[in-house]
Amino acid sequence: MTTVVHGASQVVRVDADGLDVVEGGSVAIEDGTVAAVGPTDDVEQEYPVEGADTTVDAAGQTVLPGYVDPHTHAVFAGERVDEFAMKLRGRSYQDIQAEGGGILSTVRAVRESSCTELRDHLLAHLDVMLAYGTTTAEVKSGYGLSLDAERKLLEAVARANERHPIDLVPTFLGAHAVPADAEPDAYVDRVVDEQLPSIADADLAVFCDVFCDEGAFTHDQSRRILEAGIDHGLTPKIHAEEFDHRNGAKLAAELGAASADHLLQATPDDAAAMAEASVTPVLLPGTAFALDVPYADPTLFQDAGLSVALATDFNPNCYSQSMEFAMSLACNGMRMAPADALRGATQHAAEALALTDGTGTLQEGAPGDLVVADVPRFEYIPYNAGVRTTETVLKSGEVVHRD
């Protein structure tokens, strides 16, 4: 099957050197893979529009790789809109959780939900993510905090992945918080001895993550969990240096993690260690926005030679499914250049998920996942903050969303 997206104002490819912007370009996709990208006349000489099975007229619009969201908690039940009002009255994240809200509130809702209910709830969120241009997304567990509930969450992810165009990358986050009925070290024992073996044996996750921070898990507890994950074949990730500095970023470097995420309290030494170990920093500007705290500093990592990935951190406390909004916050809140923000939402986000097939690049030979945005050039996407610019989304060359 051949698909031709033709006549765009811009086509944006991403590579190791940056962005390759083709003015007046087209893209041809054959059997789900990008076959040609370049000026419209050149592409259509080899792949004429009239001979294609599917065509998309992108006149006046911008074509770019489908967004990759490398950090989400999109599988959950219930909502926490009441906590939104509490935050506006000055209550902190830690205050709310100490009173049984926050993560523990969502845990109660998840435990009361069936796998089918969780799957359907996730599918609804994925529809929104797709409409904003996301074609690949990581989804973490972590709102179960017991063997049965964590398995249920990851089984819901697997079932949603069978039904939805977005490719889902599952992460086990049994160490998201300490449940109300457990002591921290005893719960770590349960994660290591019960949850991890069962999740790994069922092949329900690619990554193992842990929340190494104030009110969650210590450095030593995090090490134990991540090393156990490695023993079970799961690649480590880590929530690090969000509220407190616990050397989580250096632990990520020591263990060869795919990414360290959040990093609001990270230091130059952290960035240097991550760079030496090629650990991708994943910054989550939506979280800082939702918590009304200072943003992470991307230059800290860029100066160390690292490429910065961006993600939504979509969850009940950071309720945005839009990578477009994440890019806008990265530019306006973290002062990232638009080109760096776009790379962070595509190529570098794919690197944070250890994807090596060209996802997030729109290069020839890469998956035919792309966004057609109703803007004349890519800088309009973060510039036009809060407005959805995505009009058409293709997954493996098939139109999966069109306004």
Image (tube, helix red, strand yellow):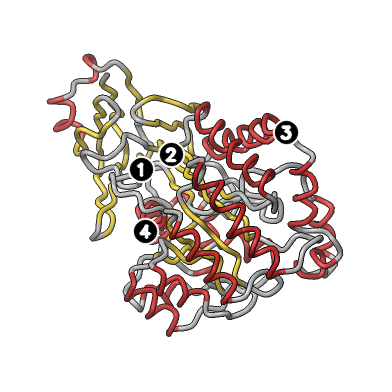
Instruction: Calculate the distance from the C-alpha at mark 4 to the C-alpha at mark 3.
Output: 42 Å
What is the C-alpha distance between the residues marked 3 and 2? 37 Å
Give the label, 3 or 2, closer to the camera.
Answer: 3
Helix, strand or loop at mark 2: strand
Residue behind mark 3: 114
Residue for badge 4: 339
**Marks 2 and 3: in contact by CB < 8 Å?**
no
Q: Nearer the viewer, residue 222 or 211?
A: 222
- Residue at the image point whose x is 32% and y is 21% from the top: 55
The answer to whether any part of residue 18 appears in the image is yes
From what the image shows, is residue 109 above or below residue 326? Answer: above
Label 1 to label 4, Cα distance in Å? 12 Å
Identity, as a three-letter code, of the amino acid under mark 3 = Ser
Residue denoted by label 1: 64
Q: CA distance from mark 4 to mark 2?
A: 15 Å
Residue 184 point in image, percent of width and height? 71, 69
Counting residues from the start of the chain, the first of labels 3 and 1 encountered is: 1
Q: Is residue 244 left or right of residue 277?
A: right
Query: In this rendering, is residue 36 above or below 239?
Result: above
Badge 3 or badge 2: first in the primary sequence: 3
Describe residue 13's horizontal placement relative to residue 206 as left or right. left
Q: Nearer the viewer, residue 69 or 194?
A: 194
**Residue 140: where, in percent of width, then height?**
57, 50
Quick check: 155 left or right of 277?
A: right
Q: Please name the residue that numbered disc 2 is placed on.
A: 373
- Name the residue type under label 2: Ala
Q: Going from the N terminus, do you reach mark 4 or mark 3 first?
A: 3
Q: Residues within 10 Å of mark 4 (few under 14, many from 20)?
A: some
* Residues at marks 1 and 2 touching, judged by CB atoms closer than 8 Å: yes
Dot 4 or dot 2, earlier in sequence: 4
Tell me which amino acid carries mark 1.
Leu
